[in-house]
Amino acid sequence: MTADSNNHLWWQEGVIYQIYPRSFQDSNGDGIGDLQGILDRLDYLQWLGVTAVWLSPIYPSPMADFGYDISDYQGIHPLFGSKEDFKRLLDAVHHRGMKLILDLVPNHTSDQHPWFLESRSARDNPKRDWYLWHDPLPDGSPPNNWLSVFGGSGWQWDEPTGQYYYHAFLKEQPDLNWRNPEVRQAMFDVMRFWLDLGVDGFRVDVMWHMIKDQQLRDNPANPDYQSYMATYEQLLPVYSTDQPEVHDLVLEMRKVLDAYDDRLMIGEIYLPIHQLVAYYGIDGKGAHLPFNFQLLLLPWDSRQIAAAIDQYEGVLPAGGWPNWVLGNHDQPRITSRVGKEQARVAALLLLTLRGTPTIYYGDEIGMRDVPIPFGEVQDPQGLNMPDKNLSRDPARTPMQWDNSPNAGFTTGKPWLRLADQFRRENVQAQRDDPYSMLTLHRRIIGLRQQEQSLMVGDYVPVFADTQLIAYVRQAKGYPRFLIILNLSHRPAYFKTKDPTLKGVVELATYPEREGQTVGESIQLGGDEGVVIRLD
Ligand code: NOJ
């Protein structure tokens, strides 16, 4: 698709906003966010300018992994509300011209899901083969060395039936056997159920985990393992993830979506980019957006990031639409990684790169990772590996709306404690402050959505050194933009001999800069980023 075409799809033109439902807005005082709370905050999202909302799981679940352990794929957890609440939310989102994306967790169910209860009940149960059951080795040990992402072996012994089952995550999250056609059909039915209701797409959880090596070969040792890393990283998961057959499966899932108009499939995939882009599928018939997590994972280093952007642009298959993610519920928040000032530069980067951006709730007000005392840790990843600082709770704390008790999130006791500084750092305090992080987000989203070049235009790399990254965004027949970002804390010169790179600063991390004419050079302050409208 060329940049001057106006035929872009909603998810190519849009900005996605991820809501972690437990933490967004509580409406009934139980300390846990819910669907009514989200509905009550839709005006805010519309004001911010985001165009699609992705909800982390809202289905019935014992909450061993906070909703990523599903016990009914077609219901709503009473903590979050009812089916009627969901329908009202979906309608209200659509009414505002926005889209709603649900989390789909097809790799594993809860151990309380009726499918697993049946499967585990007897070896000859018709659903036995819906999960990955295997005999022990002759000495009684697990079938192979595969590890659980959350620590320990990936195999759980089941005494009554004398076999192990595999779980890539918690033992309460048994992996489904996607080689079984009945499993496929059951999950495709789940997809159709929500698509029929009008849901606009899915973010597919751990897409690269869905099929495992049929021979169950041992994973090799990771030569780069260090003791501070999660125990899972002791091995390279070459046989337990990213198997060639997964691509047929993704294609089949895509076919389910393609029977509807204009629905979106995002894949959650943590892989090096050459492997990642294979998930676009042959002829683009795979995931529309295999999530690109490079900005989350790379050191915050201008040369590395510039190289990664160019490399990504270079390996994208024809027609493959790029995307960028700066935060999610599994990773430290950007403000905590790079600091408050640099997080503003990061926001400009996220929202001026080519491709669909995903914003994690709260990052738009610069929320930080909140220290959670040992006794209050809830995340199983944190609880299982307590000495490794791997808890994801700090990035999942309640949204900071205002300076009232509990930041306006709940009238009850919040399920996770709030940031101490919420009275200063909240939506209300930032909404009308021209220098706030929130205002910066709202303005850059607004500019992106209004300017064809920024929304869907080509990306042209211009310059990168140990401090700066500069690039142009351009769509044929529309004003072009030069973006220069200083990823360091020290001032830096940008110089160019290209006479066409002249213009006026339209938007900047330090708004004092705006309106300034830029010729062949500009000196940026530390942590400064500018978006220049070219003449
Ligand atoms: C990825 C999800 O983002 C994460 O939160 C979850 O723990 C695992 N998948 C398991 O579902």
Image (cartoon, helix red, strand yellow):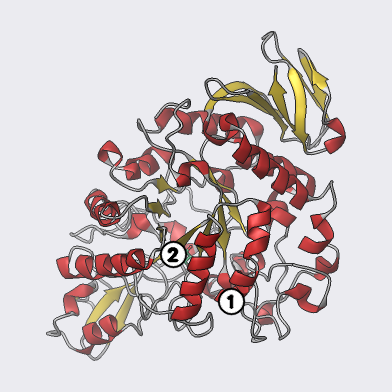
Identify which residue is drawn at 24% across, 85% down.
120
Q: Residues within 10 Å of mark 2 (few under 14, many from 20)?
A: many
Depth order, front residue of 382/408: 408
Image coordinates for residue 487, horizontal then vertical, percent: 71, 35
Q: Which mark is residue 103?
A: 2
Quadrant location of residue 533? top right
Determine if the C-beta at disc 2 is less than 8 A from ligand 1.
yes
Image coordinates for residue 35, horizontal then vertical, percent: 55, 75
Image coordinates for residue 442, horizontal then vertical, percent: 71, 48
Q: Say whether residue 450 is visible.
A: yes
Q: Circle 2 sits in a helix, a strand or a loop, which is it?
A: strand
Is 397 rendered above or below residue 13?
below
Quadrant location of residue 520? top right
> Is 247 displayed left or right of 9 in the figure?
left
The C terminus lies in quadrant? top right
Can you identify the residue that label 1 sits on?
Answer: 36
What residue type is disc 2 on?
Asp
Q: Which mark is residue 174?
A: none
Q: Residues within 10 Å of mark 1 (few under 14, many from 20)?
A: some
